[in-house]
Image (cartoon, helix red, strand yellow):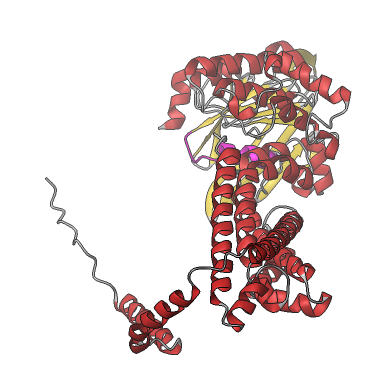
Amino acid sequence: MSARCIRTPGTHSSTISSVTNLTTETQVAPTRPQQTGAEVFAPVLPVDLRVTRLAKSFAGTLIFKNVSFGLSRGEAVAIVGANGTGKSTLLRCLMGLIPADAGAIDVLGTDVRGAKSSDLRAMRAQMGLVSQKHNLVPRLSVLSNVVQGLLGQSPGIRHWSQSFAPAASRAEAMAALTKVGLAHLASRRADRLSGGQSQRVAIARALVGQPKILIADEPTASLDPAAGEDVMDLFFDLARQEGVTVIFISHNIDHALRYGDRVLGLADGGMPLDARAKNLSAQDLRGLYD
Amino acid sequence: MTDASMPARYERPSALAFLGYAAAVVIILWSFAGAGFSIDKEISSPPRFADFIDRAFPPNMEPKVLARLGWKMLETLQIALAGAVIGIVCSVPVALLAARGLIAPTWINQVVRTGLGFIRAVPDIAWALVFVVAVGLGPFAGMLAIAIDTIGFCGRFFADDMEAADKGPSESLTATGARKLDVVACATIPATMPAFISTSLFATEKAVRSSTILGLVGAGGIGIELKVGFDLFDYPTAMTVILMIAVVVISFEYLSGWARTKIIGEQR
């Protein structure tokens, strides 16, 4: 990620990327950029996502509050934390799938909390989601599942199934399947795939619409370690090729440090960790699970 | 060893629970009384039943009678199939409106569910009477009665199936920016298709059973032959009708079970 940051004299960025330059300790609170003479490290790429003082409770139980961070274009951010700290809830709030209680969420210029349904759909059409469980539609073919990834951009019956889809959409879906190495299984029913294959199809579905932001909620949780490594390598290879911003949840500390440019840690109803991955050790992250 | 004592084999009910059990027993006994339950009649009925069997057997197997009843049975199946298909097809949009959290707001869910409850509350034979008044005597009234009865049954179960469907695929498609209708068409309905097929087959079985008695009120089918047989004390013919209905209904249940296994059994 550091390759994407250039020296910009006099720049005083308020984006969270500036925070990531600081980290040497495990627990790092967001701060202003570290000034070194007249120069600071700051991204010139646009900010895709900004969260400010976000709070969420379920039935009176606080999940998190005062969560603030931002993501620059092309950045990969890992979210870590023990079960119940609100990682998945946070991601769902970002996509407007569930409402937050307080704070502000800006995704690709859309105020998620105040947006109309149509604005939310337009925003989501620029995002992709890969879930813990692949969430493919089991009775449909692999190609139909991938074609449905275009529903946000082209709603309606033409994208309900590959049978009705325009030639261009079918070609895009096949191209996405080729990227994940499963073009030869395009006609197979989704419920006839292995776990690793299913997750690859889910990645193809998330990528077919050429999203600006990819969200992955423990994409390897239901896979064996070898398949999990394959899926993570593929996911990040493709994301980096396409220059996509990635935010992913992982309980695998090694994955968080290896694939994330930054690591955000949720614990005790807040986000006590926001640090560059290269400045963290596995031991630092284990503290979040104590 | 811990100092935890062995739990009692049976829990002693609370006073409130005991009152509830007592009330349930009273209501059941009261229902028996209201239904005219009589041990005397139970004891005296077997000889009468034996007398009926004696007069009904052997069933009337004259070719002319069998041909007439056969055509009526065919008409009965046609009423059942046509009514069930119309009912099942109409149930899908109705269920979409009844299912909570899919495409319609809560107040529409409630209105549609209340409507479906009303349809189910009215017996199919009563619907047949209503449609005989509305469209006249004959099989069309029976078909409409079966269709409306099927909507009440399938509409409710389709809606419940859609509410219970795995939300994962729906969420993934919602996350692509898809509209609610697209999400339902692409994720919810395919996920519930096995349940839809199973419910539809049960509805068709139910329609076949129901259609055999609609003729009692002039709504077509073989029921009228049963009524005439009993009215004229022609018990052999009435027995032929009863056996014919039993054979057809049981055969259809086997066929439906086989179809269910073939279609849904392939699911993993």
Rendered view: B47 above or below A184 = below
- The x and y percentages for residue B27 are 40, 84
Question: Magenta region's main secondary structure?
Answer: helix
- Picture quarter containing residue B70? bottom right
Pick whichever, B240 or B24, lies toward us: B240
Looking at the image, which is closer to me, B171 or B98? Answer: B98
Residue at image coords 63%, 61%: B208
Residue A18 visible in rendering = no
Q: What stretch is highlighted in magenta?
A: A82-94
List x then y, in percent, for residue A72. 74, 25
Compared across the picture, whether B266 is left or right of B10 comes to right
Q: If the image is split into quadrants, where does the N terminus of chain B sit?
A: top left
Q: In which quarter of the image is the C terminus of chain B?
A: top right
Q: Where is residue B224 in the image (x, y as percent from the top left)?
A: 67, 74
Residue A93 lies within the magenta run: yes
Residue A94, above or below B195: above
Q: Which residue shows up at 55% across the image and 58% down it?
A: B247
> In the image shown, does B35 or A113 lie closer to the viewer?
B35
User: Image quarter for residue A49?
Assistant: top right
- Residue A282 seen in the current view: yes
Residue A141 among those drawn in magenta: no
Quarter where residue B194 is shown:
top right
Seen as rendered, the residue at the extreme top is A3
In the rendered view, would you say B149 is above or below B25? above
Q: In x, y percent, where is residue B197?
A: 64, 47
